[in-house]
Amino acid sequence: DGGITQSPKYLFRKEGQNVTLSCEQNLNHDAMYWYRQDPGQGLRLIYYSQIVNDFQKGDIAEGYSVSREKKESFPLTVTSAQKNPTAFYLCASSLASGYTFGSGTRLTVV
Amino acid sequence: AQSVTQPDIHITVSEGASLELRCNYSYGATPYLFWYVQSPGQGLQLLLKYFSGDTLVQGIKGFEAEFKRSQSSFNLRKPSVHWSDAAEYFCAVGVYNNNDMRFGAGTRLTVKP
């Protein structure tokens, strides 16, 4: 079955450390997205990519970085510059008729 | 840019009762509208979507939504709620090609036995 795979499901980050969240899709979708979800705030867009080797900042890109070297993959790096990274991160992809979401990664700073 | 408002942060209904979750959008042209459901610790699952045509849209799990242009609304309804419907529900509005979709803050549904 086609879908989006996010890994790991849980991730712990120490202060000052960079961590990378994986997002892989086999839906042949061109566009991919990263969202951050905090309680009571809905989904906020971090970065999105419409084609390979191109990506755009969303509403809260500071402290995050992405790459899109392959159509199937859109990893998100949470850098040490992100001062409050504890959140639930969702990856999504789309073709033209709505988004398909992964099951999310919960990142916690320890 | 488009935006979405879900006026109700939390709703509690009894099992078997009817449900209506409100969604209001702001967009100058005809929007693409979506409802998603999220169980705790999971991703979002698409319930239904409206692009054009019939303003009453049927979705999965017995849900439906009605697009009312005059009220800029896209409310989600279900005639009889089941305990398994307890979750968070998100309304979203998109534009052509859905590359700029905006989500509401969500409505958390609790179902009483």
Image: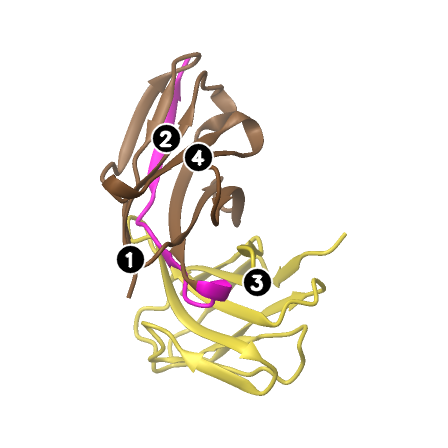
Mark 4–mark 3 CB contact (< 8 Å): no
| Chain identifier of the yellow chain | A
Instruction: Identify the amino acid type marked 2.
Output: Leu
Pointer 4 residue: B87
| Residue range (magenta) | B96-113
Query: Disc 2 on helix, strand or loop?
Result: strand
Tell which residue pokes out farthest to the bottom in this image: A53
Mark 1 vs mark 2: give the one in front: 1
Q: Tell me the chain of label 3.
A: A
For marks 4 and 1, the one nearer the N-term is 1
Residue drawn at 34 percent across, 82 percent down: A81
* Visual hue assigned to chain B: brown
Residue B34, position in %: x, y? 44, 47
Asked if A96 appears above or below A78 in the picture, the reply is: above
Mark 2–mark 3 CB contact (< 8 Å): no
Mark 4 vs mark 1: give the one in front: 1
Using the numbered discs, state the Cα–Cα distance from disc 2 to disc 4 in whole angstroms.
Answer: 5 Å
Asked if B93 appears above or below A58 in the picture, the reply is: above
Pointer 1 residue: B27
**Circle number at residue B103:** none
Q: Is residue B97 one of those drawn in magenta?
A: yes
Would you call the spot at circle 4 few (<14 residues within 10 Å), some (14-19), or many (20 or more)? some
Pointer 3 residue: A94
